[in-house]
Image: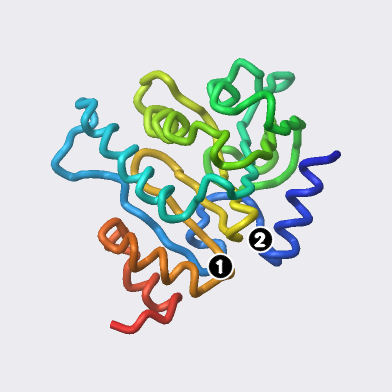
């Protein structure tokens, strides 16, 4: 079974024209952008990271149920022969008895410019499982930690594709999280449930895209 092919087919069918890359918020699909930071907390304080994870868990509780089918797409930019190793912290957060995992290396233009250049090597992994079998809280903490030399950490891009609810979510770092879906009504539900966490600078754009009445 080719998990990469399966994920690509799913995205082609449900997110026509979508490229799985950052930033999700500007991918052309209806989107939400969440603020994970508490301005009253400092990054030198562990409470800051506790709050980031607390907010991600709220987003998770609204948008992911335990019996949802999940595909995690993980991409890490690598040099020459380096690759994603199975001792990566991410793979300690899945159940080896239930998860399906596949790896591959890729060399292609993903980002036209920016820190990765035009054709960097990337190592990729796809994980398929039920949401309940994945330790998401640990994953969220590790992403929040990455830019601060804290452990545990996961370096790279981690996209959570909810195959059941037709969403793609990216916690891009400790600052925020994007969530997209072609289902406008579903995003409206999430908007109202999580309105206090919407990133204010993007709220007008979100209201316009989702046709939310003020």
Tell me the distance, in whole angstroms, between the alpha carbons under discs 1 and 2: 8 Å
* 207 in relation to 137, above or below: below
Q: Callout 2 environment at 10 Å: few (<14), some (14 to 19), or many (20+)?
A: some
For the N terminus, the image quarter is: top right
User: Which residue is found at the position 57% from the left and 45% from the top?
Assistant: 159
User: Which residue is found at the position 54% from the left and 50% from the top?
Assistant: 22
> Would you say 108 lies left or right of 18 here?
right
Q: Callout 1 environment at 10 Å: few (<14), some (14 to 19), or many (20+)?
A: some
> Would you say 190 lies left or right of 88 here?
left
Marker disc for residue 29: 1
Q: Secondary structure at mark 1?
A: loop
User: Which residue is found at the position 37% from the left and 48% from the top?
Assistant: 176
Q: Which residue is mark 2?
A: 18
Q: x, y (%) of residue 54?
A: 31, 40
Q: x, y (%) of residue 131?
A: 56, 42
Q: Secondary structure at mark 2?
A: loop
* 60 in relation to 165, above or below: above
């Amino acid at each position: 079974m080719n998990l990469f092919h399966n994920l690509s087919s799913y995205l082609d069918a449900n997110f026509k024209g979508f490229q799985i890359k950052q930033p999700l918020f500007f991918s052309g699909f209806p989107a939400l952008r969440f603020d994970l930071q508490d301005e009253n907390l400092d990054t030198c304080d562990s409470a800051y990271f506790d709050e980031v994870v607390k907010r991600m868990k709220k987003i998770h509780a609204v948008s992911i149920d335990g019996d949802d089918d999940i595909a995690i797409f993980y991409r890490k930019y690598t040099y020459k022969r380096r690759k994603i190793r199975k001792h990566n912290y991410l793979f300690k957060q899945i159940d080896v008895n239930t998860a399906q995992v596949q790896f591959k290396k890729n060399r292609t233009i993903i980002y036209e410019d920016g820190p990765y250049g035009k054709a960097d090597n990337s190592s990729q992994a796809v994980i398929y499982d039920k949401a309940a079998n994945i330790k998401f809280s640990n994953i969220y903490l590790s992403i929040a930690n990455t830019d601060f030399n804290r452990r545990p950490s996961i370096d790279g891009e981690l996209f959570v594709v909810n195959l059941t609810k037709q969403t793609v979510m990216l916690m891009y770092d400790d600052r925020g999280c994007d969530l997209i879906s072609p289902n406008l009504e579903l995003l409206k539900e999430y908007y109202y449930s999580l309105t206090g966490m919407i990133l204010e600078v993007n709220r007008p754009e979100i209201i316009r895209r989702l046709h939310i009445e003020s």
